[in-house]
Amino acid sequence: MKKGTEKKKPLKKEKEQKSKKEATKEADKTRKTYSVLRGMHDILPREEKYWKPLFHIAENLAEHFQFGRIETPALEEAQLFVRSLGKGTDVVEKEMYIFDISEGKVCLRPEATASVARAFVNAGMWNYPQPVKVWYFEPMFRHDRPQAGRYRQFSQVGYEIIGALDPASDAELILISYNFFKDIGLPVEVRINSIGLPDERERYKAELANYYRNKKSYLCDDCRKRLLKNPLRLLDCKENQCQPIKDEAPQIVDWLSDESKSYFMKVLEYLDELQVPYVLQPTLVRGLDYYTHTVFEIYPSVEEEKKADGESTASSAGGSSSAGAQSALGGGGRYDLLIEELSGKPTPAAGVAIGVDRTVALLKHYAEKMSFNLPKPQYDIFFAQLGDRAKGCGLKMIDDLRKSGLKIGFNLYKNSLKTQLELANDIKVPYALILGQKEVQEGTVIIRDMESGIQEIVDQKKVENILKRKLKKFDVQSK
Ligand code: AMP
């Protein structure tokens, strides 16, 4: 009897194990690994060292130049962008993420100027002190063909000045963009042009189309389409076969009225005074319908790029760079008619948007080539613990010291003291706190001088003041 039961048991167990294994195998087959969508990318904690300084610089500039932060929803009525950017533009024709929902057609915003203009109209911001200056740091969405430096979700930092028709506002925006890159340490160049007012532009468009029509048989396929749909975009062409034709093309500046010309001259004068270097680029038109007068783009400095890449690759004018030096890092201009187009009171405005992902890519590229020193977080002390009780008590101590203004590095999940002290060395703190079981029981903690290795035991209640005195950063009265 006993024998029989003994034999039966392992059999049952074996069967159960087998069927469990089979079930797991089946589940594994159906379990899928999810990848990030094409053209999208995760920004991992290790990238923070690039993103964080950019955000801070953008925020500092905003504070300094008195821009208030604006956040608009990522989802908007699709028609907002169709009306603002224009039907014939690439963004509207090919790149918008559009969905049908019960309210109608909505889309993920491809850019933020139209959203900011909508918010301005909705909130009746004419009643605010003028001009209204706002900035944003938000993700944008464009369903474009992904390639290096071109994503389907990317972030832009942007500044808009609404309610001022003054060349100084154009200069202020260019100065901010220039400073943004200067503060990061990235050498850039500003390319600038004026596209005047719509009637001036229409006359120029007709002349441009006329000029190109005679040379149709020499044009690339894209340019033939552009000639029919949006002749201004002929000036964007990068194909070699079209370059000689583009070089000889009529220039928009010759179609500007005297007022438009003198407005533009004033912007350039301000830039000279501000010592912001710029390059006049007669073919720069920006792709969107809402622009008037000044348009500009920011590019990585070709000269600096050559230096960083070494002369061997210099002949490609930086085009060989992994960061894609031919791509603009930012762009902007005036949009004096947009608010009115969105049924608001006529309100002149100007803005700029800087691509953060592209800037980060370039920053990484330069960091590799030129060993850039990106700002690192500065810690005052490191906290090291030994044993379970020290963890709980330590977390409380870390939080109390944090509240008192000290910046503390720690890793509660490393048990070896040696490893923790190595971490303290890595972040270059002058002192480490060490808390073991004995110290927890006695209400004390060890302060270790990281340079000399000298340790002293102090009362937990006094540690904050002792540390602050040692660090000499804080105004502490001796107790
Ligand atoms: P735009 O107004 O289209 O010229 O965009 C302004 C800036 O945003 C550009 O100069 C780029 O730095 C950035 N940007 C635009 N489109 C993309 C994209 N698809 N992926 C990454 N960055 C982009």
Image: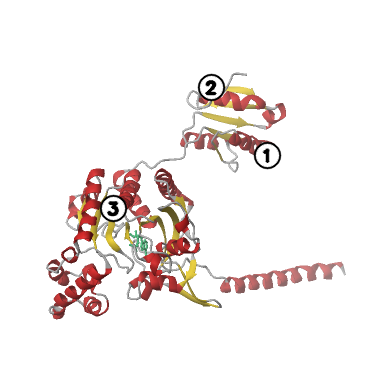
Q: Farthest top residue? A: 478
Distance in Å between CA atoms under marks 2 and 1:
26 Å
Where is mark 2, residue-wise? 454
Q: Are marks 3 and 1 in contact (CB under 8 Å)?
A: no
Disc nearest the viewer among 2 and 1: 1
Tag 3, which secondary structure?
helix
Which image quarter is the C terminus in?
Answer: top right
Which image quarter is the N terminus in?
Answer: bottom right
Q: Residue 68 at x, y = what percent?
A: 46, 50
Marking on residue 410: none
Q: Residue 454 at x, y = what percent?
A: 53, 22
Q: Are marks 2 and 1 in contact (CB under 8 Å)?
A: no
Label 2: how many residues lie within 10 Å, few (<14), some (14-19) or many (20+)?
few
Where is mark 3, residue-wise? 167
Task: Say whether mark 1 is within 8 Å of ligand 1.
Answer: no
Residue type at numbered disc 3: Pro
Disc nearest the viewer among 3 and 2: 3
Tag 1, which secondary structure?
helix
> Dividing the image into four equal quarters, which quarter contains ligand 1?
bottom left
Q: Residue at x 50, y 60 (%)?
A: 123
Please say whether residue 143 is visible from this viewpoint. no
Which of marks 1 and 2 precedes in the sequence?
1
